[in-house]
Image: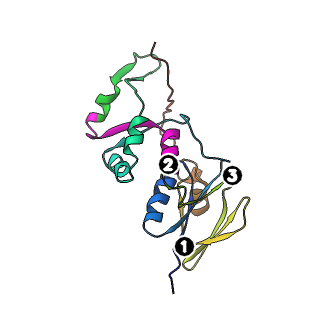
């Protein structure tokens, strides 16, 4: 009698969720990725993602490295602007040298598209929905969704970002454990004129 494949729900279809889904399906699991947006967030949207050392090696193992290198950003200069003080400028490549000999910067949307295309035939994707409740019972988790019928999984993984719904359902309101560190960060691209 064939063994049923372990069902894994991954909440979030940006980068971490599809990478995990790719590897899970390669090793015999049955992954489902649920994403609250109606479709994959493609294009150059979002911020740049820096892939260092092990992440570059992982992309190589997945066979996506040539496509990722072809879509890399061409950032040359990074400026830290501080009110009332002179800006600090550094060559982008110089910043990575002390971290890793392997470094690729790519826009989040481009990276998400490459990874999604790699495994979408073998991974179930559910768009325009999100996890509503989680209830663990023995070795299973009963999951209700905002739009679709309830389902049961053996494992649920939250890969749904900074203000994660999955994290809130498991650990409670993030305001209970988050603390403001006293700074803000804004990232944007400007023409090289």
Instruction: Tell me where residue 100 appears, x and y as whole percent.
Output: 27, 41
Question: Along the horizontal axis of the image, is 146 left or right of 61?
Answer: right
* Of pointers 3 and 1, the one earlier in the residue sequence: 3
Marker disc for residue 154? 1
* Of pointers 2 and 3, the one earlier in the residue sequence: 2
Marker disc for residue 15? 2
Report the residue at 60% width, 46% height from top: 40
For label 1, the crowd category at 10 Å Cα-Cα, with few meaning under 14, some 14 to 19 and many 20 or more, is some
Question: Along the horizontal axis of the image, is 182 left or right of 36?
Answer: left
Front-lying residue, 169 or 189? 189
**Tag nearer the camera, 3 or 1:** 3
Instruction: Tell me where residue 172 appears, x and y as whole percent.
Output: 60, 59
Q: Residue furthest bottom?
A: 1
Q: Secondary structure at mark 3?
A: loop
Q: Quadrant of residue 43?
A: top right
Marker disc for residue 90? none
Q: Which residues are magenta?
A: 97-116
């Amino acid at each position: 009698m064939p063994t049923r494949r372990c069902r894994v729900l991954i909440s979030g279809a940006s980068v971490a969720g599809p990478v995990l889904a790719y590897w899970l399906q390669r090793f015999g699991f049955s992954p489902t990725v649920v994403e609250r947006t109606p479709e994959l967030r493609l294009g150059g949207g979002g911020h740049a993602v820096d892939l260092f050392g092990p992440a570059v090696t992982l992309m190589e193992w997945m066979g996506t490295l040539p496509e990722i290198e072809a879509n890399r950003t061409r950032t040359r200069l990074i400026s830290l602007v501080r009110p009332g003080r002179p800006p600090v400028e550094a060559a982008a490549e110089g910043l990575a040298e002390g971290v890793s000999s392997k470094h690729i910067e790519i826009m989040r949307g481009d990276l998400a598209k490459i990874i999604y295309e790699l495994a979408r035939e073998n991974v179930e994707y559910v768009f325009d929905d999100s996890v509503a409740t989680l209830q663990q019972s023995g070795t299973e988790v009963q999951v209700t969704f905002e739009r679709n019928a309830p389902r049961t999984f053996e494992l649920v993984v939250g890969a749904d970002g900074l203000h994660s719904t999955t994290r809130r359902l498991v650990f409670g309101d993030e305001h209970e454990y988050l603390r403001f560190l006293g700074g803000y960060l804004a990232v944007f691209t400007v023409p090289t004129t």
